[in-house]
Amino acid sequence: MKLLDGKKLSVEIKDEMAGEVSEIVKSGQRPPHLAAVLVGSNPASTFYVKSKVKNCKKIGFESTLIEKSADTSEAELLGIIDQLNQRDDIDGYIVQLPLPDHIDEERVNLAIDHRKDVDGFHPVNFGRMAQGMPAFLPATPYGILMMLERYDIDTTGKHCVVVGRSNIVGTPMSILMSRKNKPGNCTVTLTHSRTKDIGAELRRADIVIAAIGKPNFVTADMIKEGAVVIDVGINRVEDSSKKKGYRIVGDVDFDNVSPKCSYITPVPGGVGLMTVTALLKNTLHARNKSIYS
């Protein structure tokens, strides 16, 4: 069993980006600029956004953090988005989810200029991705693709089972793994909470991508020998032995599944770090206009 080390790989890719940014600045041009909009004070959202800002600084990006209170109106947020769409000095931006209940996330998503949609959630980017056209890919699936590529994992002709059908991870992941590409060229089964006997589907899988949001959902009896397992889950479970009273686990029962795998991602230290790296990569693409000229 080999670990797919997201921590090590993300550092490697960010170092490469830092070198590219340094060359951009040396040539007299401005560095990439990522903006983030945070509405409310959700602890997880605050942590993620500030982590992204911190990573920008490390690799030489400019960053702008716009923080608004939870009672910010939808109209005010849409006004902020319009301003970001028009600013030539900002290459890409994200509106951190989830948003307060009184704000329509779909309306917000549609308002974002798809050419600055470095989260890859806009229907234009999703549609272009589905048709195999250049697009900003959703950050988590993009991070997983980079991981598979960098570890030289052969996916051609393999059976990939995706667990979870969200628009952020599961559904785009199923499309990307089936595309005529490398990584890709898989036969894909997309499973979810209504799938009958998910275990039977998983036991046929050469590659498992678990993104269902249930701690330790994928167990050892569901995995065949030699499978590649990608765990997207980040779940808190109570643990009185920990200072914080909880520990973080994935959607995969790592301790019992890992001995059967050829490769597996740890949680934490796996896909989560690659998600941030992919977001930064999309921002660099936006700065270089390598997706939309």
Image (tube, rainbow, N blue to C red):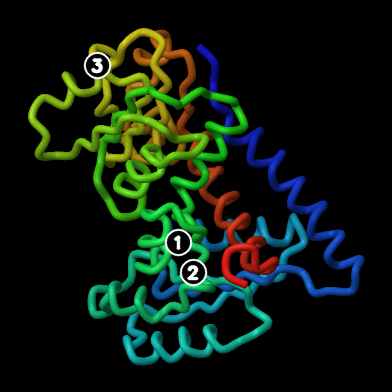
> What kind of residue is marked 3?
Arg
Q: Image quadrant for the C terminus?
A: bottom right
Q: Secondary structure at mark 1?
A: loop
Can you tell which mark lies on residue 203? 3
Q: Position of residue 201 (x, y in %)?
A: 20, 23
Residue 107 percent across, percent down from the top left:
29, 79
Mark 2 to mark 3: distance in Å? Answer: 37 Å
| Residue drawn at 25 percent across, 41 percent down | 164
Q: Could you tell me the amino acid type at mark 2?
A: Asp
Residue tagged by mark 1?
Answer: 120
Please tell me which residue is depicted at 31% across the width and 30% down the height of the picture: 187
- Residue 239 falls left or right of residue 5: left
The disc, 2 or 3, on the residue closer to the chain's N-terminal end is: 2
Which labelled disc corresponds to residue 226? none
Look at mark 2 in the image and give the residue it sits on.
117
Image coordinates of residue 126 in percent, x first then y, are 38, 60
Residue 5, quarter of the rendered image: top right
For residue 249, above or below residue 132: above
Secondary structure at badge 3 equals loop
Q: Which of the 4 quarters of the picture holds residue 2?
A: top right
Q: Is residue 245 visible?
A: no
Determine whether, in the image, residue 34 is placed left or right of residue 180.
right
Residue occupying image coordinates x 27% and y 25%? 218
Q: Position of residue 288 (x, y in %)?
A: 70, 66
Asked if marks 1 and 2 touch (Cβ < 8 Å), the reply is yes
Q: Is residue 93 left or right of residue 17?
A: left
Nearest to the observer: residue 153 or residue 77: 153
Packing grade of label 3 (10 A; few <14, some 14-19, many >=20) is some
In three-dimensional space, the C-alpha distance between marks 1 and 2, rounded to whole angstroms, equals 5 Å
